[in-house]
């Protein structure tokens, strides 16, 4: 009984110390979070890519297969078949680098056949495109696995491989665009060749566009004239300063091209964080004023959300870099 009082006092003191320590935990957590959430000067990186819905892409691919199957079960009209033949003839000549007169005549045949084919509506043209798309994908797979550019690939895609090589998206027989990006690229090529880009029924679906722009935004490159100019300038560069200036010019050209892709994607996909993406690309391009304004634009419309903290940090970096210029 005599010893119980000191023991109780000691126990109460220990409990008080433990309670005090526990009370400090929320304060420590709040302090750490506060430090993390403070805007910091961080150089922008990571241009966001559009989010693609795989289920939506699967539905589009299934619809394309159904169109191609229907075209094989129920033969296309004579006018649409004539258009398909005219397209194949032109592309075959194009792949062979035929002379200008032969290409002119072949192009005139395509335009004439298109007028007749349009009389039957756009559904038969969708079927024709689906058939040629399947052939294209089959021949591209053969090219990438064996390096063979078949006559059929030339007939449905013309100088496609050569164009991809010029763009820097094909080395040897390794082709950069694949899957949905490749399918969408072909649809755009097909529509553009026939001058049908404005027909809503023929436009790729939104998730197809997202897949294509996810590829182009993540594979930016300057145009061929700029690449040729940079290559020539590098051959004449005499010191590290000149080489560094050329590297900076190349980076600027790359980001300028990427900014074009961001603008085109924003035109078809209003959910894409275009202003934020412009801020990152403009900073990497060295246009710090445009970068800062893009981040301000994003934050005006999105003060909270997944990009808000990064946008504030990147804005500080862009504003500071702008002052140094």
Image: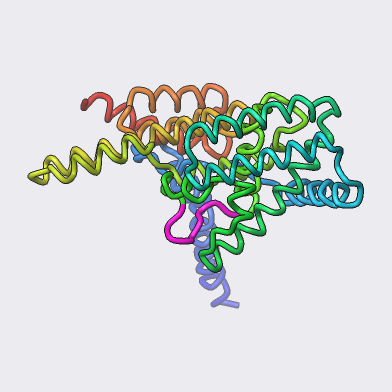
Above or below 62: residue 273:
above
Q: Is residue 129 visible?
A: yes
Give the image quarter of residue 115: top right
Quadrant position of the C terminus in the picture: top left
Q: Is residue 270 visible?
A: no
Q: Position of residue 100 (x, y in %)?
A: 48, 33
Q: Is residue 203 left or right of residue 124?
A: left
Q: Is residue 72 left or right of residue 213?
A: right
Q: Which sits in the foreground, 121 or 35?
A: 121
Residue with the most extreme right position: 74
Q: Position of residue 9 (x, y in %)?
A: 52, 66
Q: At 41% from the left edge and 35% from the top edge, which residue is drawn?
A: 281
Q: Position of residue 297 (x, y in %)?
A: 49, 22
Q: At 35% from the left edge and 33% from the top edge, which residue is drawn?
A: 283
Q: Which sits in the foreground, 20 or 104?
A: 104
What range is drawn magenta here? 170-178
Q: Which sits in the foreground, 159 or 59?
A: 159
Quadrant position of the N terminus in the picture: bottom right
């Amino acid at each position: 009984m005599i010893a119980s009082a000191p023991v109780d006092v000691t126990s109460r003191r220990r409990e008080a110390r433990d309670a005090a320590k526990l009370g400090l935990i929320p304060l420590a957590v709040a302090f750490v979070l506060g430090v993390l959430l403070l805007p910091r000067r961080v150089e922008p990186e990571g241009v966001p890519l559009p989010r693609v819905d795989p289920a939506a892409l699967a539905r589009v691919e299934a619809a394309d297969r159904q169109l191609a199957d229907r075209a094989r079960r129920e033969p296309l009209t004579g006018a649409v078949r004539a258009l398909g033949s005219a397209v194949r003839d032109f592309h075959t000549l194009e792949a062979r680098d035929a002379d200008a007169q032969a290409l002119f005549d072949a192009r005139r045949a395509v335009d004439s056949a298109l007028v007749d084919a349009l009389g039957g509506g756009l559904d038969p043209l969708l079927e024709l495109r689906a058939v040629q798309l399947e052939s294209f994908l089959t021949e591209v797979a053969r090219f990438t696995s064996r390096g063979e550019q078949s006559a059929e690939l030339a007939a449905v895609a013309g100088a496609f491989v050569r164009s991809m090589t010029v763009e820097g998206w094909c080395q040897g027989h390794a082709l950069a665009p694949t899957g949905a990006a490749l399918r969408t690229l072909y649809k755009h090529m097909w529509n553009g060749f026939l001058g049908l880009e404005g027909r809503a029924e023929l436009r790729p679906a939104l998730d197809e566009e997202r897949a294509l722009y996810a590829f182009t935004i993540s594979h930016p490159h300057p145009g061929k004239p700029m690449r040729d100019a940079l290559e020539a300038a590098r051959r004449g560069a005499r010191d590290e300063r000149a080489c560094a200036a050329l590297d900076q010019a190349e980076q600027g050209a790359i980001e300028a091209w990427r900014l074009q892709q961001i603008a085109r994607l924003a035109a078809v996909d209003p959910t894409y964080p275009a202003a934020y993406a412009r801020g990152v690309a403009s900073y990497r391009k060295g246009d710090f004023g445009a970068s800062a304004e893009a981040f301000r634009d994003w934050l005006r419309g999105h003060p909270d959300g997944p990009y808000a903290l990064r946008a504030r940090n990147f804005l500080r970096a862009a504003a500071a870099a702008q002052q140094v210029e």
